[in-house]
Amino acid sequence: MAAYSADNAPTTRKGRATRERIIEVAARLMQDRGVSGTTLEEVEAAAAVGRSQMYHYFAGKDDLVGAVIDHQIRGILASQASRDGLSSWRAWEEWRDHTVEHSSKDNCAGGCPLGSLASELAEISEEARGRLSASFLQWEESFHEGLSTMKSQGLLSDSADPARLAIGIMTSLEGGLLMSQTHRDRKYLEIALDGALGHVRAVGAPPHQLS
Amino acid sequence: MAAYSADNAPTTRKGRATRERIIEVAARLMQDRGVSGTTLEEVEAAAAVGRSQMYHYFAGKDDLVGAVIDHQIRGILASQASRDGLSSWRAWEEWRDHTVEHSSKDNCAGGCPLGSLASELAEISEEARGRLSASFLQWEESFHEGLSTMKSQGLLSDSADPARLAIGIMTSLEGGLLMSQTHRDRKYLEIALDGALGHVRAVGAPPHQLS
DNA sequence: AGCATTTTGTACTTGCTAATACAATCTTGT
DNA sequence: ACAAGATTGTATTAGCAAGTACAAAATGCT
């Protein structure tokens, strides 16, 4: 997938830094307060840039939102690539713990960087929905790959369906994050992830390998 | 939980009808386009009421949103009460099918009546977050009750934890709805619910009762 | 019927926010 | 150094949406 087409792609080092700063700040604010709860003025103030810089690098708010989506999925995939590609039981356990701990910061506020955007934008902008769908697919694919590797290593039984299991983990993750965010209680995400991973073990592993 | 405190409670039949009409229209529009994507003007037009009626029955937009949340959870609980309180395997199967079919209308558009509101409002309004949390708790409790009944009837093993299972179903439901909405593909909700209910069967039932 | 209360119609105000215009300044390559 | 282009500052515009004011009409009660 091509990088997001900016209004004016930055050529100088300074320009790239400015554009990046805008995106990072916008991503944070939009996850906190939602897209329509975040004004360009707030982004500009927090990023210490002016109106002209905003419109120099982005065609408008929609354009910025697109860049934020790309930024979020990049961050997620990068964070996951650094944990062994989720191709061992241990990696999954660490991922589970890390995910819960990360979400529990600030009283489970914020929710999922992509999920909160998806919920807000899916029905409003078909373009944003498509971009979010593609991003979630990449995320799901990273789960899928790890599980496939485990299957090829005999850690999952032959009858296991990695694609299906990946979707189960994805949906449990999103539901758990939303419920923990709404209730301000980490137990929802914990139970959701334990259930999904438990399912992977139960369905995927030969009986004698169960703990 | 007391009914939502309106600015002016309607006393006449006509007044009640007007207020109800506003809430129903607002609920539909807000689920489709989000809260901040729905203007009071649009609600007024669709409900065929004027500005003065809106502000006569509601103190403002926030007040209307509160009434919409109450309206949504009432509808959900009513729909569920009419299906045997989810206290048999058959009831759960029917619930699963009905939920998937209902969500698949309009290409999985809309998502969850409460979930989409929760995602949008949780970080913006503490009052709305509390109201949504309480509503989800009631929903979860309706799952819990059904599962508890099944346990007392021996349909679930003694080691089964109905409260935990209820949370697992709730999170899978929300995650599945969000993913199906984003991808416009019912399979996400199907897999999520099958996983959660499969977990109930696997963890809850004595081995010899597994299909 | 007649009066008090509820309900409704219309016009206006206020504030915010995305978007634009245009000029000034900085960077880079030669 | 010096153009050419990239980057940034400031001021303004235009439109929308929440909320308000006030009067008119309908309704219910005795």
Image (tube, coloured by chain):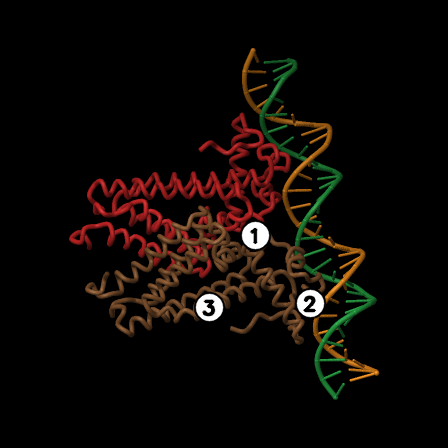
Chain colours: A red, B brown, C orange, D green
* Residue sitting nearer the eye, A176 or B113: B113
Quarter holding the N terminus of chain A is top left
Residue D24 lies, in percent from the top left, at 82, 67
Question: Which comes before the other along the chain, label 1 or label 3?
Answer: 1
- How packed mark 2 is, by other alpha carbons closer than 10 Å (few <14, some 14-19, many 20 or more), is some
Residue contact between numbered discs 1 and 3, judged by CB atoms under 8 Å: no
Task: Tell me which amino acid carries mark 2.
Answer: His
Q: In the rendered view, would you say B40 is above or below B145? A: above
Q: Which residue is mark 3?
A: B77
* Residue sitting nearer the eye, A119 or B50: B50
Residue B139 lies, in percent from the top left, at 43, 66
Question: Which comes before the other along the chain, label 2 or label 1?
Answer: 1
Circle 3: element type: helix
Task: Tell me which amino acid carries mark 3.
Answer: Leu
- How packed mark 3 is, by other alpha carbons closer than 10 Å (few <14, some 14-19, many 20 or more), is some
Splitting the image into 4 quarters, where does residue B102 fall?
A: bottom left
Residue at mark 3: chain:
B
Q: Which residue is mark 1?
A: B33
Circle 1: element type: helix
